[in-house]
Image (tube, rainbow, N blue to C red):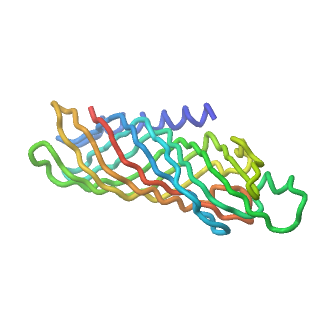
Amino acid sequence: MKKITAILIFSFLATAVFAQNFAGQGFGFRLGLTATPTVGWIKPEQGKTEGLGLGFSYGLMGDFNFAPNYSFSTALTITTINGKSTELNVMPYHSLSGTGTPVAYDLRYKLQYIELPLTIKLKTLKNDGRRWYGQFGLSNGFNISAKQNASRNGSQVGDNQNISDWTRFYRAGLIIGGGGEFDISGNTSILAGITFNNGFTNIVKDSSRDTKNHYLALNFGLFF
């Protein structure tokens, strides 16, 4: 896991160096910090969504401005996606139940990812130190922590259970969102916006289940 983290950090910084060296006149790479509350939910194909979960995302963000109104935008963040669901025959609990009949489990997921999004921003021209943007692209998530609370018929069968062995390492999603940038001093500006991250890969390894997670993020950041 440490090697993967180091590779992702190196890739992010290498992109920044490349952008700074090869940007056109008046453009370039902008680096910043981001802190983002999230609202997540779980959507199982064989079951139902039971509730939302609050999470958080934080880390670095960067915009490679290759034209006056267009940017390649990426980030390197730690993102938590929480949510509740009811699902059938969930491992590892079902293997211990000693029954061959379908059993429904009430679950609370607590998942954490290193995220490396690859997106395009379409921006308006700056007016009085502010501009608006729309954003679309791909989310790449690499699981670093997977825990779960589980109950069956009102009885708890898992308390902060480590489910890393039953959770897929890679998560992909589509990102769509928008917001604004507001200059505050020199090259420093504040970013505020909202994005929807629509996960489209199965987050569990069990081939008999198809479960996805999604989240809304209220984005805040500071570019330098």
Residue 212: x and y in percent read 59, 60
Residue at the image position 49 percent from the left and 44 percent from the top:
55
Horizontal side of residue 203 vs 179, given as left or right: right
Residue 196: x and y in percent read 41, 57
Horizontal side of residue 134 vs 112, given as left or right: left
When asked about the image quadrant of residue 47, the answer is bottom right
Identify whether 200 is placed above or below 79: below
Horizontal side of residue 184 vs 175, given as left or right: left
The C terminus: image quadrant: top left
Identify whether 168 is placed above or below 21: below
- In the rendered image, the residue lying farthest to the left is 128
Q: Nearer the viewer, residue 55 or 187?
A: 55
Residue at the image position 53 percent from the left and 50 percent from the top:
53
Horizontal side of residue 80 vs 30, given as left or right: right
Residue at the image position 76 percent from the left and 51 percent from the top:
155
Q: Nearer the viewer, residue 197 or 65?
A: 197
Identify whether 97 is placed above or below 183: below
- In the rendered image, the residue lying farthest to the front is 154
When asked about the image quadrant of residue 135, the answer is bottom left
The N terminus: image quadrant: top right
